[in-house]
Amino acid sequence: MCAKCGHPLCDEHKKKGISLRTNNPIILCPGCQESTSHTLRNTIIGLSIGLIIILIILVYYLSTLFPLGF
């Protein structure tokens, strides 16, 4: 059974999941593995964009406090 959606797994996925796991007892079906990787990728992209925006605002704010005098 898939740990996320509860769908039964085929024997190949059961063997692959059990042989690859270490301390993690979770075996996911291919659909749930794909959605998890997409969610992680979208989260990383969103956080990267947010970090870049915050850095641009911080640089602009610090440049108003300490002008470089060029």
Image: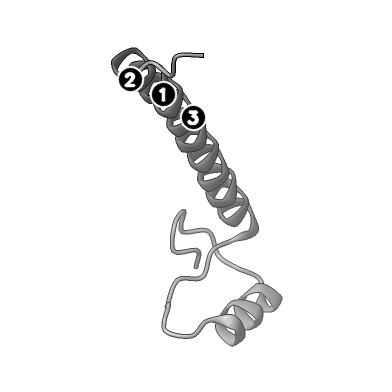
Name the foreground residue: 7 vs 23. 23
The residues tagged by marks 3 and 1 sit, at their Cα atoms, a distance apart of: 11 Å
Categorize mark 1 by other alpha carbons within 10 Å: few (<14), some (14-19), many (20+): few
Name the foreground residue: 46 vs 20. 46
Image position, residue 60 (x, y; %): 40, 17
Categorize mark 3 by other alpha carbons within 10 Å: few (<14), some (14-19), many (20+): few
Indicate which disc, 3 or 2, sits on the residue closer to the N terminus. Answer: 3
Q: Secondary structure at mark 3?
A: helix
Residue at 59% of width from left, 44% of height from top?
38
- On the rendered structure, is 3 left or right of 34? left
Residue at 34% of width from left, 22% of height from top?
62
- Indicate whether 63 appears above or below 29: above
Indicate which disc, 1 or 2, sits on the residue closer to the N terminus. Answer: 1
Indicate which disc, 3 or 1, sits on the residue closer to the N terminus. Answer: 3
Image position, residue 27 (x, y; %): 51, 70
Q: Amino acid at mark 3?
A: Ile
- Indicate whether 17 appears above or below 69: below
Name the foreground residue: 55 vs 60. 60
- On the rendered structure, is 12 left or right of 8? right
Q: State the residue position of label 3.
A: 52
Q: Label 2 near label 3: C-beta < 8 Å?
A: no
Categorize mark 2 by other alpha carbons within 10 Å: few (<14), some (14-19), many (20+): few
Examine the image and state in which quarter residue 58 appears. top left
- Indicate whether 10 appears above or below 20: above
Residue at 44% of width from left, 64% of height from top?
3
Q: State the residue position of label 2.
A: 66
- On the rendered structure, is 10 left or right of 23? right
Q: State the residue position of label 1.
A: 59
State which mark lies toward you, 3 or 2.
Answer: 2
Q: Amino acid at mark 2?
A: Phe
Residue at 49% of width from left, 32% of height from top?
46
